[in-house]
Image (cartoon, rainbow, N blue to C red):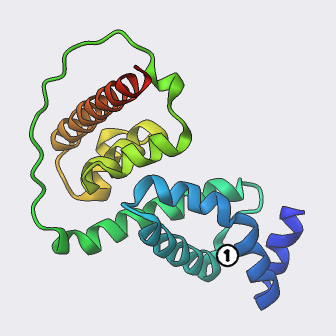
Amino acid sequence: MEKDLIQEARKGDPRSLERLYKHFYGYAMSVALRYSGNREEACEIVNDSFMKVFDKLGQYSEGSSFKGWLRRILINTSVDYYRRNLKHSGMMDVELLEVEASHFNVLDELSREDILALLRELPDTLRIIFNMFEVEGYKHNEIAAHLNIPSSTCRTYLARAKDMLREKIIALNHVRNERAV
């Protein structure tokens, strides 16, 4: 079905393009939400990505995964969105956090929504680097090239993102434990 849908969309038929958009919208939104600060930004990223997909549909190789191709476009569009809006967000001020080691498995208790909410609380740069490295599997030098930063800075920001997430998880666990008492 997806193969037929893609073939029809390649012909440029507006109905087929709309069906393709609707079919992959949920997947695209799930990727964009990991990179964006909120749902509004994610919608903009998804729509911009689909415009690129529609423009470049002829370049898609039928033998490869369409979702993989779409995911790459979504990630690149997310990074472009971040770069375009970086000048509006000012300088990023991130302090190194010291987090004491803790033996708990609170991650098992977090819902998908909890995790997305915690990721959205990260500063934009940290959220994008964390997603690209931990979720998408990019290497530090690839992320650095996308964001025009040194590879060492990418490593530092990833460590900061992990520290901040760890701190947020500890705080969330503390709040939940207090409520349970």
For the N terminus, the quadrant is bottom right
Q: Position of residue 45 (x, y in %)?
A: 47, 71
Does 127 appear above or below 69?
above
Q: Where is residue 174 in the image (x, y as percent from the top left)?
A: 32, 25
Left or right of 73 on screen, residue 123: left
Pick whichever, 176 or 61, lies toward us: 176
Does 28 appear above or below 11?
above
For the C terminus, the quadrant is top left
- Determine the residue positioned at 47% across, 66% down: 39
Left or right of 76 on screen, residue 6: right
Q: Where is residue 143 in the image (x, y as percent from the top left)?
A: 32, 48
- Determine the residue positioned at 19% across, 16% down: 100
- Determine the residue positioned at 53% across, 72% down: 49
Task: Give the secondary structure at mark 1.
Answer: helix
Does 16 appear above or below 68?
below
Which residue lies under the disc numbered 1? 57
- Asked if residue 5 shows in the view, the reply is yes
Q: Where is residue 9 in the image (x, y as percent from the top left)?
A: 78, 79
Pick whichever, 173 or 91, lies toward us: 173
Left or right of 64 on screen, residue 153: left
- Determine the residue positioned at 52% across, 26% down: 109
Residue lying at the far top in this picture: please name it: 103
Q: What residue type is labelled 1?
A: Leu
